[in-house]
Image (cartoon, grey):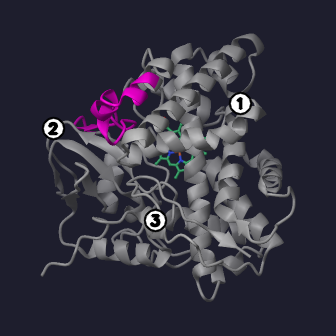
Amino acid sequence: MAAEFPFSRLTSNQLTYSERDEGYRLLHARPEPSRRHDSGLCLVWRYDDVRELLEAAAPEISNAQSLRPLVGFGRIAVNPRAVGHFCRHLLPPPAKATADLTDDVLHRRVWACMAGPSGYFTVHADTRSERADALAEHFRQSLPVPGEVTEPLDVTAVSITYAARIIGETVGLPQRDWPAVAEWSGAQSGLLGRRMRGRELADAVGALGRLFTVSGLAVAHSRQHGTGFPGHLRAAGIPPRVAVSAVANSLAAGVHTVSGSIQQGMQRLLGDPDRKWWKLLGEPAGAARVAAKVLQLDPGLVGWKRNIVRPIVLRSGTRLPKGPVLVMFGAANRDPRAFADPLAMDSAGKVPLTFGFGRHTCPGKQLAQLAVEVFLRELHSRAPHAQLVDPARSPRSRPADLLFSGADIVIR
Ligand code: HEM
């Protein structure tokens, strides 16, 4: 009997780190390079194929559907509560500004506002240590009693608060809105990677709507006060509707990607009986190495969507039919064709694809790397002897999610 296809029943979000390691190993041992998933997406996992799809340089590969809800707009249209939220917050429909924008000229202008030399999210070498200090302060403020590691500590909750504070501040939302950023951005993440229905779907559309509403207020406010990321977009001449979407997309993009990486990283660091990588966090430059490895092996975002508009043969020879594809970079980052020994620290290999490749590469990459590094270092310095408390919830009780991945981590 043929071996069961890994990830057909459970997603990365529902597995322990060792189950993920085994699942990805089995995936790369398979003879075929792609597989149709029952979500309707075609799964692709080999490094070279994933990179070519992310790059989307060929006319057959499109990014236009990248932010489309997994259940499609049809399911939303027949859900009266979702329609109500949609009409209240999302009409006229938001402009495309980032991941799904196909106007390359406009996209380059928006992207330059976020990344590159004058990008708002860029972490410059000369101010890196001040940025790290500011992130450490966000860590302290995210603890249940600011500055103190209480026991037991819900690392999952702390990591979400931490990421929401960082992204809320970076994107320029008033502090009173930061706590809600986690919920709103969770809604966008859930809509992309989960098959939601009923009330859950309606609530997610409502939360996504509020994300756009507060982003609209932030852009309107910047017209008078000209500050922060919205002011930066305005100064660059980005049309207001596009600026609103750039703000909303950034708010949505940063929270569960950063916090999910921290959660899954902690699962591995403390789950390893030898705790070798956890101990490394106490060494100079150790946290940067560990964060880089966590982001290669256990990123909070494991896949992304592309659409094949006409059947294509990729450079490797992989044939893909017309239709949506799930580009599994969490898998590609462990492809033995690209990484000699992916599970080893400092092993040789190609550039991990965690942050994409090509013109849509993540503009928050440097900030995300630093945020994961600072969180792990700060937690280790306060709780070097931390132990995982047996989770009350098994990873199986987490929802199936094709894109986003995290873990329920409690320590004492
Ligand atoms: C571990 C954390 C993160 C991961 C794994 C991640 C991953 C990615 C990936 C794979 C893409 C490429 C999408 C594509 O090719 O279409 C992307 C795009 C994007 N990311 Fe991130 N990201 C992270 C954190 C952040 C943060 C902190 C921010 C904001 C401060 C951010 C903002 C964005 C935006 C706005 C885009 C769209 C870029 C464009 O298409 O122009 N991300 N991210």
Give the amino acid type for the residue marked by disc 2 in the picture: Arg
- Viewed as shown, does residue 29 lie left or right of 193? left
- Element type where label 3 sits in the image: helix
Front in this rendered view, residue 181 or 319: 181
- Element type where label 2 sits in the image: loop
Which residue, given by chain and number where applicable, does mark 2 sit on?
A: 310
- Element type where label 1 sits in the image: loop
Work out whether residue 306 can be spotted.
Answer: yes
Give the amino acid type for the residue marked by disc 1 in the picture: Gly
- Residue 62 on image: x %, y %: 29, 36
- Residue 152 on image: x %, y %: 74, 71
- Residue 253 on image: x %, y %: 54, 42
Magenta includes 281? no
Which residue, given by chain and number where applicable, does mark 1 sit on?
A: 172
Magenta includes 67? yes
Magenta segment: 58-84
**Earlier-in-chain disc, 3 versus 2:** 2
Front in this rendered view, residue 386 or 111: 386
Which residue, given by chain and number where applicable, does mark 3 sit on?
A: 397
Query: Real-space Cα distance between discs 2 and 1?
Result: 40 Å
**Earlier-in-chain disc, 1 versus 3:** 1
Q: How many residues crowd mark 2 within 10 Å: few (<14), some (14–19), many (20+)?
A: some
Residue shown at 27% from the left, 64% from the top? 8
Which circle marks residue 53 in the picture?
none
Looking at the rendered image, the quarter that the C terminus falls into is: bottom right
Which is in the foreground here, disc 3 or disc 2? 3
Looking at the rendered image, the quarter that the N terminus falls into is: bottom left
Above or below, comparing residue 58 to residue 400 in the picture: above
Front in this rendered view, residue 312 or 164: 164
- Residue 257 on image: x %, y %: 55, 51
Query: Real-space Cα distance between discs 1 and 3?
Result: 35 Å
- Viewed as shown, does residue 48 lie left or right of 374? left
